[in-house]
Image (cartoon, helix red, strand yellow):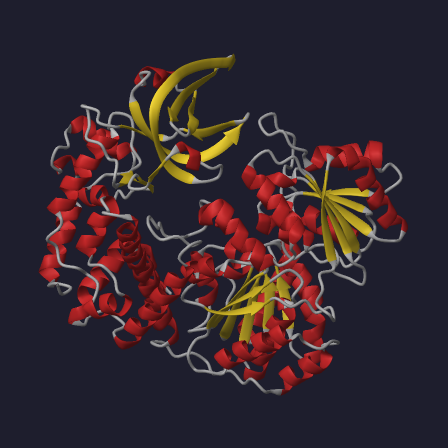
Amino acid sequence: MSSGSVPARIGRLMRWQRPVGEARFVDRSRAEALERVGVHTIGDLARHFPFRYLDLSDVRPLVKALPGTEITVTGRVHKVTVKRPRPRLTIVEVAITDSTGILLGVWFNQPYMAERFQEGEHVAFAGRVEQDFGFLQMKNPFVERLGSAEAPSHLGRVLPIHRATEGLTTNWLRRLIAAAVDDVADVPDFLPVRLRIRHGLLSERLAVRAMHFPRDVAEAAAARQRLAYDELLCLQLGLAARRHTITVERSGIAHITDGPSLQRLRAAIPFALTSDQSTAVAEILDDMGSSRPANRMLLGDVGTGKTVVAAHALAAVADTGTQAAMMAPTEVLAVQYAERVGPLLDEAGVSWALLTGSAGAKTRAEVLGGLESGEISVLFGTHALIEKSVRFQRLSLAIVDEQHRFGVVQRLALRQKGSAADMLVMTATPIPRSLALTRFGDLETSYLRQRPHGDGEPRVTTRLVTKAHRDQAYEEVRSAVRQGRQAYIVCALVDESDALQARSANAEAKRLAQEVFRDLRVGVLTGKMTSAERLATMQRFRAAELDVLVATTVIEVGVDVPNATVMLIEDAERFGLAQLHQLRGRVGRGRYPGSVLLFADPKTAESRSRMKAVVSTTDGFVLAEEDLRLRGAGQLMGEAQHGLPELSVASLVDDVDLLDIAREDAREIIAADPHLGAPEHVALGIEAKRRFAEGWTWVSSG
């Protein structure tokens, strides 16, 4: 079937967007139950897909129930036992047997489960097998009563497991979904036929039905492939359209990329660039040399030297006679860039200034005047750069560092201070490739993985330390200070909390200064301090006026004190992998290698996996992929700020190859039909904008 006419597509949308209370078999109480799980429309109901399947077509004898396997077994209920090992804990154990063995189904704090089984009845259990106290167990297994009069047997088929809710049984939920799927089955497919043929995809109608009620595991996988591709393609279309709007439909400034300022800068750099740095510089300058506005992201792992790469772009701006702005998320980082990049720009003959929120009135007036007159070529600063009073004579390059700490609106506000200015966003936080393509798919990417330390070997060792060895860890700090070095001690909290049992920076700094390091100079740095206090403290630490700095994650990004060689991280299990990696990047930045000691008491499998990962590798991109696998995109980027679209089927962990395919398809479509006005693309455009409306608002605002 073709993609269908526009009226047919609009009719489908209207039908899918009707309230779920109008769906067949849905009364008021069922509608309320559905809304509790996020189902508000008939379309939501049809797309309330299973979160897992049970393969009841492959039933095994109990002897085949091996620990660690997902399996379906059958047997007779031998015994039902209710245990209460301690107050407020009830354990129900249901033992089933066949001629080959015995297995326990176990439920915690669900005493009513004991009433649901009768000795001698024939049942099927499906789930993951574990071994505990010498017995094979399934915790909270799916249960099917074989031959029960109350429901037909599902044995012999693949059974979908939907997210249910109080007041709606799984059987009723399946019935409601089946009716909704039938009611929307006759709508035309929005995906162009050529794409379905190219990738061997099911039709949308078959995919939706098979996703809910597959005949076998292979059909469920094929359905998921089609529906995951739909999500990723619609998302990538919005990103490709935004990229086209910014880089093709607008005319920018073609920068001079071989001028005298750039040549002097290269001569002033006292070391050879790594091959990654050289490649990134070439890519950025190639972008800037075009009249199309550049739109690039530079991802640099800890210690890979993205700052010196950015300096080349700043010099090219000066050669062109235009201006550049480099915005950092904190005043500490903005000052650091001025201190590190400023001297290189001086050598290159490039004028520059620093503007932060704490700048005095006189300094601020001088900077603003220099910008408007064009006397200042490069401006470093914080959020202060996007204030209305900051006006450039001719801004042609906007650089945003640690871009994930700024919102889309803030990045856009800086860029719009120029006319079609080039944009370079940078981050020292490694981002998984799938996440980068999903969140920043409209940006070209350059990667820095090599460290400019000769052989490229990691210069920081990481160890897990138990509480019993705390004194030895403190002695390592003392040893470093005796050798003229400095140390960080990182805490998860600023102040003590009754709710969160973790060490706080303020209390720990006081304790260490009074009890542990009485002969050392101990300082404290937290996000609750004023900007001036933070800056003063960092200047004291950088000047070696402090031996030990107790801090929160305010030091996570960009802080560069080459003399710091030891870091102790308290309650390390409370931090994400990317955060731990960023923190340890603060040591070992100078002549001497660094050492990171993790005080941790991981109580969950996830936290144990994170501790194992951060100790075993120093590759930030490997850790980022592991963090994504363990915690998901929302936690990785921050629930409120990550800006990621809702993906109900596709997975950024499992569907990287499919994401690549969808991205290439989207770019091909937008290159040929930027506004999706061709007959074969109209329905696709409607669907993409319906699913990811925010992505399409970028097209008009980017």
- Residue 69 horizontal/vertical position (percent): 45, 40
**Where 290 falls versus 295 (above or below)?**
below
Residue shown at the point (38%, 18%) measured from the top left:
78
Using the image, determine if residue 413 lies above or below residue 600: below
* Residue nearer the viewer, 50 or 472: 50
Instruction: Give the residue drawn at x 75%, y 37%.
Output: 509
Residue 591: percent from left, percent from top:
80, 63
Inspect this view and state whether residue 322 appears: no
Q: Give the residue at x 57% y 59%.
A: 621
Position above or below: 36 against 252: above
| Residue 169 visible in image | yes
Answer left or right for 44 relative to 334: left
Q: Outermost residue, front direction?
A: 99
- The residue at 11%/36% (across/down) is 24
- Is 430 left, or right, of 679 in this rendering? right
| Front-lying residue, 512 or 202 | 202
Can you give x and y, in whole percent of width and height, for residue 693 in the image?
A: 29, 55
Q: Name the image quarter holding residue 624.
A: bottom right
Quadrant where the N terminus sits is bottom left
Q: Nearer the viewer, residue 691 or 547?
A: 691
Left or right: 417, with 41 as reference point: right
Q: Quadrant of the C terminus?
A: bottom left
Estimate the x, y position of residue 259 in percent, counting from the top left: 60, 87
